[in-house]
Image (cartoon, helix red, strand yellow):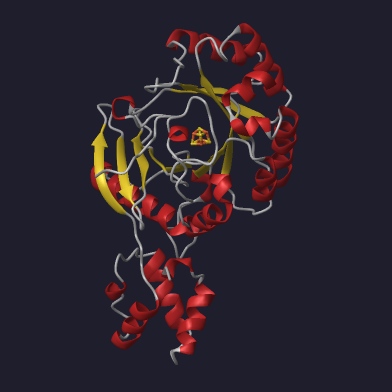
Amino acid sequence: MDIRSLEEHELTGWCVRQGQPAYRGRQIYEWLWKKQVRNLDEMTNIPKDLRARLCEDFSLRPLREIQTSRSADGSEKVIYSLHGGAVLEGVLIPSKSDDQRVTACVSSQVGCSLRCAFCATARIPFGRNVTAGEIVDQVADLNAKSEAEHGRRLSNIVYMGMGEPLANYDEVVRSIRLITADNGLAFSPRRITLSTAGLVPEIRRLAGEKLGIHLAVSLHSAIERTRRSMMSSARTYDLDEIADAVRSWRKETGDIVTFEYLLLSGVNDTPEEHAALLRFARALPCKVNLIEYNSVVGIPFTGTSEGAINSFAQGLRDADVTVTVRHSRGKDIDAACGQLAARKIS
Ligand code: SF4
């Protein structure tokens, strides 16, 4: 059994059943989540015979880095191998400005259980959900790289890598609690953003978890037929349901949702699409993040030009919509938005 699937109270119960004091459970928990041991034998303040029993009853299955690619723009894509042979990708993105930000983009599924027409991850078969431990490992590893290469801890963590985080709800929520806990990695929840394609029941449930994180929802079009042609989830949850979920997120958490909008030339950057987005966004407590798209081999979309993105953004600003523009990072290493598609490396 993977020891990291146990909560602290379960570890404590196991220690007590071994005739050990209850505080051993907390010590083991801290070794696992705060100190990030890779081997049960590294728990030096745990008696040797107890460590031997731990090794008999449990295994520890950290992910393993197998390849790193560095982009000319400074971002870095890391391919990890998981227990059982699956692989996934995490990305480290140092800011190009002077704000000292270093962002980790983590994956929550091997492949993805959804189908977005523009996305490379959607082209690979869904493998499995990633465990909370494997998500925490990505953060811990990317944080170590940030400290070693940029001299500072991660400033932001985004659940925007491979997979739909809310389709792996329990493990993702558990990972957020571990990343933010004092006896875990102790990151501020205000620095964490979870991005979903718009799974409405899970957005409502997440709002009630009181995690203190930010939420981004992939909108990509405010016209139903366009959105449905781009995203499989849009065939399940329509724009009215997304709007209601965004309002209830605001009510429950006090936070404003960010709509992600990947600009595809001739698809969702037309005057009709612009007008629809403007109407939709103005009616809701939200921000809009326009994202530059990178072509993916075999996928018939091209990104909107930089000049057209800026005009699209200005038109929204002129109507008092809060807009940011995210230019792609890591294009040359296929680490940009929609490009992640780790395959098993032989
Ligand atoms: S864009 Fe996100 S939700 Fe859509 S297929 Fe890709 S990884 Fe899945």
Q: Of residues 266 and 325, which is closer to you in this image?
A: 266
Q: Residue at x 50, y 11 (%)?
A: 265
Q: Which residue lies most toward the bottom here?
A: 19
Q: Give the percent coordinates (x, y) of residue 64.
A: 29, 54
Name the image quarter holding residue 329.
Answer: top left
The answer, for residue 244, to whether it is visible in the render is yes
Please, is residue 1 above or below residue 222 in the view?
below
Q: Give the percent coordinates (x, y) of residue 177.
A: 53, 58
Q: Is residue 9 left or right of residue 185?
A: right
Q: Give the percent coordinates (x, y) of residue 25.
A: 45, 79
Q: Is residue 219 left or right of residue 187?
A: right
Classify the position of the C terminus by image quarter.
top left
Please, is residue 307 above or below residue 121 in the view?
above
Count of numbered marks = 0
Q: Is residue 304 left or right of residue 166?
A: left
Q: Residue at x 51, y 70 (%)?
A: 7
Q: Of residues 215 and 108, which is closer to you in this image?
A: 108
Please, is residue 314 above or below residue 164 in the view?
above
Classify the position of the N terminus by image quarter.
bottom left
Q: Of residues 231 and 175, which is closer to you in this image?
A: 231
Q: Residue at x 31, y 33 (%)?
A: 75
The answer, for residue 223, to whether it is visible in the render is no
Name the image quarter holding residue 49.
Answer: bottom left
Name the image quarter holding residue 335.
Answer: top left
Q: Is residue 146 left or right of residue 125?
A: left
Q: Give the percent coordinates (x, y) of residue 56.
A: 35, 80
